[in-house]
Amino acid sequence: MADQYEFLTKDNITDYLSSKQVFAELIDANNLVEFKEVGDGNLNLVFIMKDSSGRGIVLKQALPYVRLVGPDWPMTPSRARIESETTIIHSRFAKDLVPEIYDYDPDRFIIAMEDLSDHVVWRGALNSGLRFDGVAGPLGKYVAKTAFGTSIFGLGQEQHKLEAARAINPGLCLITEDLVFTEPYFENGRNSVLPSNEKDAQELANDKEMVNEIGLLKYKFMTAAESLIHGDLHTGSAMIKCEDKKEAVSVKAIDSEFSFYGPIGFDLGALVANYTIAAARACALGNIEQMHWALSLGEQTWVEFEKEFRKLWPSRVDKRVFTDQLLEELIKTWRADTLGYAGAKMARRIVGLAKTSDIETLEPNVREGAARAVLQIARKTTKERNQAKSWAALAKEAAEIIQKTATK
């Protein structure tokens, strides 16, 4: 049985590290001086170990259930294989933007990877009011490099189909299909909001135009095998290293266990959604300058994505009918998809299960307005995703909504 395997603990990790030759040159298992359990809280066990010489390693083990909920919500631990394989594949195209994978244990669903303890989680930095440049752009470049490299343009027809088949991930796709595209609009017992936001949640669910757009986006999510997407790319899955407290010198995309062959705009939309959520938090805390900066990040991500994809386009495998004019049509489509998925991700993070600390750690008196603003922006962004608005105009509209709905 997949759920009958030994879980890592502080008591058995030394034996585990000593049992595999691959770790011998990475860390001294018999001389560990630091041990931290830093699990992401929702799904997995994550441990950081360091030896006396300062060498570190991370072990991440998938549990056979959703850690956030417990054994009552079973989940295949083979998601660890997906994450390991995706990270290795993405490293072929964006090596400096993902952690190095050292080993994968298929019997105990354990990934051994690069220690990023000299990095911080970007969401945490944003929540603290810190403003690091040089993150949003590289994340857009990461999406472009991996999207092109794993697409039909980068791989060709046969290899693309083989890779799409290998990366099928139905269990975690179902979670996204339910939590992002269905449950915010059709209650099943997992949604929650402040009592003062119940009307806002109901208005979201009753918005027929929004529900129709969400249906179109869900259909595309389920059927458009464009590239090997990360599947859960947000400010909490970006690790950053900032030596001068102003600009990141290293950016790493982590936690790609939701990866599968899906629509390119999904990852971009997830980032834009989280930038908007960060902006709502900043306003709630009275930091208007931080709010405007956070709302400018979407443009930075998109500009770098588009720039990098255009740069790679001439190297596409088949140029016969995949013309430059097709690229223009694709860019237009992906931008609309990005905005649509951004709205979908904003809404689920306010109404559905697995919310963000940006909003949830606010005091209720200001959380109400921040949550309301995010839901209003979500509906507007998704429903108007095909309109030709500049990123500056979108940021201005979002800022106006956030400030209008702010509560003190």
Image (cartoon, rainbow, N blue to C red):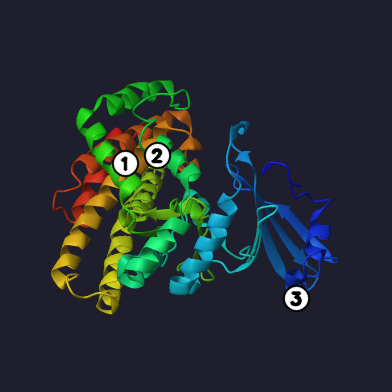
Q: Position of residue 112 (x, y in %)?
A: 66, 62
* Closer-to-camera residue (312/240): 312
- Residue 177 marker: 2
Residue 301: quarter of image: bottom left
Look at the image and tell me whether residue 322 can be seen.
Answer: yes
| Earlier-in-chain disc, 1 versus 2 | 2
Split into 4 quadrants, where in the image is the C terminus?
top left
The residue singled out by tag 3 in the image is: 25
Split into 4 quadrants, where in the image is the N terminus?
top right
Please report the residue visible at 34 percent of the width from the left and 28 percent of the height from the top.
Answer: 185
Look at the image and tell me whether residue 249 can be seen.
Answer: no
* Closer-to-camera residue (167/88): 167
Left/right placement of residue 67 relative to residue 230 reads right
Give me the C-alpha separation between circle 1 and circle 2: 7 Å
Task: Give the amino acid type for the residue marked by disc 1 in the picture.
Answer: Lys
Q: Position of residue 61 (x, y in %)?
A: 66, 51
Task: Give the amino acid type for the residue marked by disc 3 in the picture.
Answer: Glu
Task: Give the amino acid type for the residue marked by disc 2 in the picture.
Answer: Glu
Please report the residue visible at 37 percent of the width from the left and 30 percent of the height from the top.
Answer: 184
Question: Vertical placement of 197 versus 125: above or below?
Answer: above
| Earlier-in-chain disc, 3 versus 2 | 3
Q: Position of residue 327 (x, y in %)?
A: 19, 67
Q: Are marks 1 and 2 in contact (CB under 8 Å)?
A: yes
Give me the C-alpha separation between circle 3 and circle 2: 42 Å
